[in-house]
Image: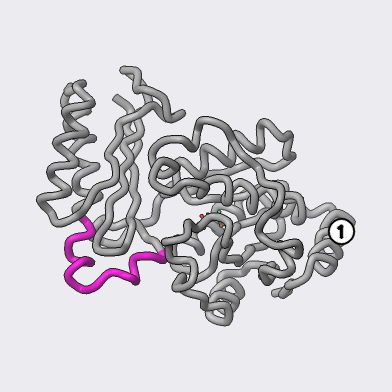
Amino acid sequence: MTRLHEVPALRAWRHAQWQEKRRVALVPTMGNLHRGHLALLDSAREHADVLIASIFVNPLQFGPNEDFDRYPRTLEADVAALEAAGCHAVFAPSERTLYPHGRDIAQIHVPHLGDHLCGADRPGHFDGVTTVVGLLFHLVQPDVAVFGRKDYQQLQLIRRMVRDLHFPTQVIGHPIEREADGLALSSRNQYLSAEERARAPALHVTLRAIAEALSGGKRDTAALEADAMERLRAAGLVPSYVRILSADLQEPEFPGEILIAAAAYLGQTRLIDNLMVHV
Ligand code: PAF
């Protein structure tokens, strides 16, 4: 596997792929790779000849009181995992390489879509995400890029950015990978104490209860959301939101593809999850 840390080396690698007429798939990550990230490579493989993953803990998408400093950085283990999974290249720039002029730089802002849900809780977060993903797309020029659907709102924002800015990149959303008890895989799960870990599946269980209620014909979404918030509190979580929306993050229309999304804190750890149902 080719290790790339600097922009000129990345550009040379990309140029070689063009010369060989190979389709390139990018899997952007912040490292600390788990089974969920490696599954993104499986989707990528279906759409391209060569796979490149990026590893960069992006300071622009963390708020001042968030976990940027303690976010787990495990580069050597990540590189070994990518190599074992058959990834062809990894781009792991330093902050100085990616942002040589500091953090106060031009940003990509996608209007409206990021104003609610996680965007309301984490001001500036999605500007940081779209800026780094736009920058990675600009540098890597991928034919395809794969993102997990756990970060559903992020995926929608990236699709909008790609549409609006004419990026020649096909964006693919990979299904959520879960633990046996339903907890969505996340690098942040390792922050949970044993007691918090035992409570964490309540998030998924609550989303499933809403899905069942919708499938059973219930349509009072405000009441379902309020019940779910109560249920999460009773399970010892501190919910930020539970929302029932259309797949494009608008008010839901029935019948249709419905997104049920939630975010909740367990101690200092913020967990998110979502389900799609057709009702
Ligand atoms: O989903 C993530 O891990 C990050 O938000 C991403 C897309 C790699 C951008 O830093």
- Residue at x-position 72% and y-position 54%: 24
* Closer to us: 6 or 148: 6
Question: Element under label 1?
Answer: helix
Protein image colouring: one colour
> Mostly what secondary structure, the magenta segment?
helix
Judge left or right: residue 116 versus residue 76: left
Quadrant housing residue 108: top right
Quadrant housing residue 193: bottom left
Q: Is residue 115 magenta?
A: no
Q: Residues within 10 Å of mark 1 (few under 14, many from 20)?
A: some
Residue 171 visible (yes or no): yes
Residue 175 against residue 160 in the figure, above or below: below
The residue tagged 1 is 15
| Quadrant that contains the N terminus | bottom right
Judge left or right: residue 175 versus residue 52: left
Question: Whole-percent x and y of residue 103?
Answer: 66, 59
Name the residue furthest right: 19
Question: Whole-percent x and y of residue 165?
Answer: 71, 35
Judge left or right: residue 274 versus residue 200: right
- Residue at x-position 17% and y-position 34%: 226
**Region of the chain picked out in magenta, as a range:** 187-201
